[in-house]
Amino acid sequence: MFSSQALGDTEKHAIRAALQEYRNNIYERNLVEIKYCVQSVIEQQSPPDCSEEDANSLALDALKSEIFPCGIRDRIKPPSDLLK
């Protein structure tokens, strides 16, 4: 492995720029996938005789198990808030 002292400022800047571009690409890709998942869950039909609150709860349960293992219930009520 090369020592960071062996790299010049130009190389360090190029590496930083490449890493930032990579982070941005991953962020954008993840954002698109999260929006797709949330939208898919929102568009699912609720069970018959299900209140809006219960439907939101079911949707949040689905999202929690799929992509949000953390406690999203504490932060949002309707799943559409995740798209904001």
Image: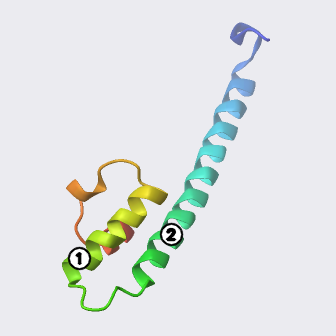
Number of marks in the image? 2
Which quadrant holds residue 84?
A: bottom left
Report crowding for label 1: few under 14, some 14 to 19, many 20 or more residues within 10 A (C-alpha): few
Which element is circle 1 on? Answer: helix
The answer to whether residue 43 is left or right of residue 5 is: left
**12 w.r.t. 69: above or below:** above
Which quadrant holds residue 3?
A: top right
User: In this orientation, does residue 35 appear?
Assistant: yes
Report crowding for label 2: few under 14, some 14 to 19, many 20 or more residues within 10 A (C-alpha): some
Image coords of residue 60 (percent x, y): 33, 66
Q: What residue lies at 61% left-to-right and 51% top-to-bottom?
A: 26
Q: Which tag is nearer the camera, tag 1 or tag 2? A: 1
- Label 1: which residue? 54
- Label 2: which residue? 37
Image coords of residue 52 (percent x, y): 22, 83
Quadrant placement of the N terminus: top right
| Spatial separation of the CA atoms under disc 1 and disc 2 | 19 Å
Amino acid under label 1? Asp
The answer to whether residue 31 is left or right of residue 19 is: left
Image coords of residue 36 (percent x, y): 53, 72
Amino acid under label 2? Cys
Do the residues bearing badges 1 and 2 touch, measured as CB atoms within 8 Å?
A: no
Q: What residue lies at 35% left-to-right and 71% top-to-bottom?
A: 59
Which element is circle 2 on? Answer: helix
70 or 84: nearer the eye? Answer: 70
Work out whether mark 1 precedes mark 2 in sequence or the reverse, and give the earlier one: 2
Residue farthest to the bottom, as pictured: 48
Q: What residue lies at 40% left-to-right and 49% top-to-bottom?
A: 69
